[in-house]
C-alpha cells in the first residue's frame, strides 16, 4: 500500500513538469527532462547525496524508473489539459 502511494506520488510529481519548457540547449540534451528529474526525486530521499549516488541508484532501480515513466506518459497521454489532468485510475 505504501509503495503504491509513493509510486502514485512520483507520477503526480512528473505531471507538474509536463508542460514546463526545457531550458537546456536542444543539441546537448541526451535525456528528456523527466528522465533526469525522476531519479533525483527518488534517490535523494533514499540517501543519495551526490550525482554519482543518484546515478548508482538509477542503475539499480532501472526497472522501477521505467515503470514510473511509462505510467506517467500513459496517465497524461492525449489529455487536453496535460499536467493539470487527473490521473487515470
Image (cartoon, helix red, strand yellow):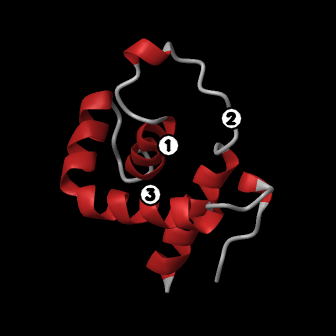
* Residue that badge 2 annotates: 20
Residue 57 is labelled as: none
Q: Quarter holding the C terminus? A: bottom right
Q: Quadrant of residue 86?
A: bottom right
Q: Position of residue 42 (x, y in %)?
A: 43, 52
- Closest to the observer, 51 or 24: 24
Q: Position of residue 39 (x, y in %)?
A: 39, 46
* Residue that badge 3 annotates: 69
Q: CA distance from mark 1 to mark 3?
A: 8 Å
Q: Are marks 1 and 3 in contact (CB under 8 Å)?
A: yes
Q: Are marks 1 and 2 in contact (CB under 8 Å)?
A: no
Residue at disc 3, secondary structure: helix
Q: Quadrant of residue 69?
A: bottom left
Q: Earlier in the sequence, mark 2 or mark 3?
A: 2
Up-down: is 77 above or below 8?
above
Q: CA distance from mark 2 to mark 3?
A: 16 Å
Tell me if mark 2 has few (under 14), some (14-19) or many (20+) residues whose alpha carbon lies within 10 angstroms of its own.
Answer: few
Residue at disc 2, secondary structure: loop
Residue under the image location 69 percent in, 48 percent down: 16
Residue 34 is labelled as: 1
Q: Earlier in the sequence, mark 1 or mark 3?
A: 1
Up-down: is 10 above or below 28?
below
Q: Earlier in the sequence, mark 1 or mark 2?
A: 2
Residue under the image location 67 percent in, 61 percent down: 78
Looking at the image, residue 66 sits to the left or right of residue 79; the answer is left
- Closest to the observer, 79 or 37: 79
Q: How many marks?
A: 3
Residue under the image location 77 percent in, 63 percent down: 85
Amino acid at each position: 500500500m505504501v509503495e503504491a502511494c509513493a509510486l502514485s506520488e512520483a507520477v503526480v510529481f512528473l505531471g507538474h513538469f509536463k508542460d514546463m519548457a526545457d531550458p537546456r540547449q536542444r543539441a546537448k540534451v541526451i535525456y528528456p527532462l523527466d528522465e533526469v528529474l525522476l531519479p533525483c526525486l527518488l534517490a535523494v530521499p533514499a540517501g543519495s547525496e551526490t550525482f554519482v549516488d543518484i546515478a548508482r541508484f538509477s542503475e539499480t532501480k532501472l526497472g522501477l524508473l521505467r515503470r514510473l515513466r511509462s505510467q506517467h506518459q500513459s496517465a497524461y497521454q492525449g489529455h487536453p489539459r496535460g499536467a493539470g489532468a487527473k490521473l487515470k485510475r
